[in-house]
Image (cartoon, grey):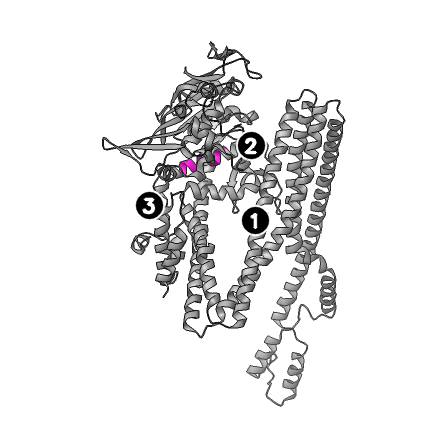
Amino acid sequence: MIIERIVFDNFRQFKGRQELVLSTLPEQNVTIVHAENGFGKTTILKGLLWVLYGQPGLMGTDGKPDDFEKPDCLVNEGVAGRASDPAQVVASVELTFKHEGMQHVLKRSLSLAQERLDAKKTDVDLVVMRDGQTHRQDNPQNRIQSIVPDGIRKLLFFNGERINYLAMEQSSGEVSEAIRQMLGLQLLDTTIQDLNHQNVKGKLRAELREQPTSEEKKGLLDLRGAKETALEELKDTIGQIRRNVTELGKDVETIDNKLAANQRAYQLQEKRLRFNQQLEELNTSRQEASAKLAKVIAEDSYTLFTKDLVNRGREIVGRLRSEGKIPAKVLNSFLAELLDSEKCICTRCLEPGSEERAAVEKLMSYAGDQDFNNAVGALDHAMGVLEESARTVEERIRELTMERLELKRQIDEIEEELEKIHKELSGKNDDEVRDLEKKRSDLLLETQSQHAELGRNEGKIEGLEQEIADLETAIRQMEDKNASAALAQRRVSAVEDSAALLEQIMEAETEELRPLLNDEIGKHFRKIMDRDFWPELSKDFTLRIRKRVAGTAADGEDGEIDAALSTGQRTVTSLVFIASLVALANRRSEIPTIVRGLSGSAYPIAIDSPFGSLSMFRKDVARYIPELAPQVLLLVSPTQYDGDVHEVLEASGRVGRRYYLTFTGPTMPDRATSELDIDGQKLQQYFSSDEEEFTRICEL
Amino acid sequence: MSEKSIQKSKPTRAQEIFLSAPEELKSLIRVVLEEERKVMHKQRRSNIHQVIYDNVKRQIK
């Protein structure tokens, strides 16, 4: 999908017809819209989402409209206010795009009359030009879903200041889901869900329950049903807790941003952010040290308990030496040879029964054995090794314990500093700061409590899953004598086994995509960040940044640890992940899969405020922006764009089209200026009017 | 997901899992995936559960 044009008509603050023609040239794939905050950047992004998905497109992942107030009021207010016939006043967005070589024109409209009744019910129309012919699609929404599935919209059209959540540990579920959605494995996921659905598996199980089968089996079936219900409830609870934790994290971040913007709090807040970052790093290092300590204890700590054994061994060897038994003066193998040959080295005969032979045979009981000599030598050596290992292990345990204690001391110090900052902010002579600080503290307490609840429930889930698996085995082992009961059991088993098999297949497919994605992620990441760091999509699908730390491995070699990520680094990591998925989706047809008919798809990316939370990485990300996707639409404010970002994007030569938004209204939005300065060109962007508010799109 | 096409090149791990499944399961999965593919982009897929249920009954006799 490559977007050619977006036309807004009386949509929100876009009065009348306003259009954006996007650059479609591969070598100039970036289109920029410059606009002050409050002028309409978010409306452009939301308009794009609305035309594609209707009302659900306006909502965030949590089902709330994010920065988009009154999502049910889409018809331009001024036009709506003057309307004599509400049925004739219409808001619409029209999207023209190319997909698989065919031009598509998608238009979604909503009349004022319909908006007042139910804004969710919109008119949608899709026309496809194929072979010079125009074809109107019967089911436009289905066609759009097949081109850009709803599940990937949050990866393609998003607010750059909020995308950092993808690189958080609790987002691993969303990351693996994003991979499946973007790379076409959703079909498997949906099939598994449908097989396990109450109307399929549930219905077949109910039929089995109706069959003439033993009371014992019925009892087990009921028990399994009850356990499964409990499991589902627990999973729902866990899902809710995870959502709560994510929301709490976002709320804390919002408060942090407000504190950072407050004149009386920003210095302390900045200090807190630095301390928080250090705290994360220290905690990571402490976890690493604990893991190393656990490894040493598990693998080598036995050597510490061998002291008595070694001492006893040394005593025995010493005694044998002092008695002259080791090393042996005469070897019994030599005596055996003499007896065999019946001739001594002094030429005497050693015939059986002779005195001489009896004397040599007596010597056999004193003589040493070469194997015995060797064994004593090996024992001696092993005792030396054990003694040395015990010393090394003792030293390593002492070092690691000291390291942990030192890290703990530093953590305590930082926690004390953070507590001081909290007290200082709580006591500030500023109502806003005090309120924010109190809210922040309450949110952190609530987050801790949610984490504890999460841990408790996860433990319960593990136990329940095992119990259900055991019941499953027991039920299947109970053979049914009745033919219809046996058939019902076979059907239930077939559905359960099919779902389980598809789970395995999906896991294997996702797992096979992981190294490919890791390659892409690494390639993209190196274009932005230092080479001492590298990103990794872990086995549990958490996006991590790893870094090398000198001499931290158990053998004293360089080790690797997870780097604690700042918001900027998380944003970069999330962007890199999305870009890698888009790149992989583009060459999907080259990657083997069990799902038939997957073809490569080009996707555009539209980002509202792409440079908002990047801090020091703005310049590097700006350089990388054209590589994000085959087509990129950026909605930027002047403060985010000026300076480095402007220079880098200008120098790249990849910006195909540029627009700016003008705002007309009685008051200028906060922090906006009346003129926009682009390339030294002063452009009036605010026009005063007491009559109404509206935004215009102007091409540069 | 035809077995011929899988066997042409070295099978992936996912393909191996599928190929080693009992014939009855492979047939069931094939028909269910086919039905799912028909409705995968539809917003309303209310009938899919009945279709799968009927297919299970037809396949496992």
Q: Does the magenta segment cover residue A464?
A: no
Q: Residue at x 61, y 70 (%)?
A: A371
User: Which three-letter amino acid code belongs to the residue tagged 3?
Assistant: Gly
Residue toward you, B52 or A566: B52
Task: Say which of marks 2 and 1 sits in front.
Answer: 1
Q: Are marks 3 and 1 in contact (CB under 8 Å)?
A: no
Q: Earlier in the sequence, mark 2 or mark 1?
A: 1
Residue A616 position (above or below residue B15): above
Q: Secondary structure at mark 2?
A: helix
> Which class describes the residues within 10 Å of circle 1: few (<14), some (14-19), or many (20+)?
few
Residue toward you, A10 or B61: A10
Q: Position of residue A252 (x, y in %)?
A: 64, 33
> Which class describes the residues within 10 Å of circle 3: few (<14), some (14-19), or many (20+)?
few
* Residue ID for mark 3: A597
Q: Position of residue A68 (x, y in %)?
A: 52, 28
> Which class describes the residues within 10 Å of circle 2: few (<14), some (14-19), or many (20+)?
many
Q: Position of residue A513 (x, y in %)?
A: 43, 45
User: Which three-letter amino acid code belongs to the residue tagged 2?
Assistant: Gln
Q: Main secondary structure of the magenta part?
A: helix
Residue toward you, A211 or A610: A211
Residue A569 is tagged as 2
Q: Earlier in the sequence, mark 3 or mark 2?
A: 2
> In the figure, is residue A414 to the left or right of A600?
right
* Residue ID for mark 1: A236
Q: Which residues are magenta?
A: A575-584
User: Which three-letter amino acid code belongs to the residue tagged 1?
Assistant: Asp
Q: Secondary structure at mark 1?
A: helix
Q: Position of residue A622 (x, y in %)?
A: 48, 24
Residue A181 position (above or below residue A646): below
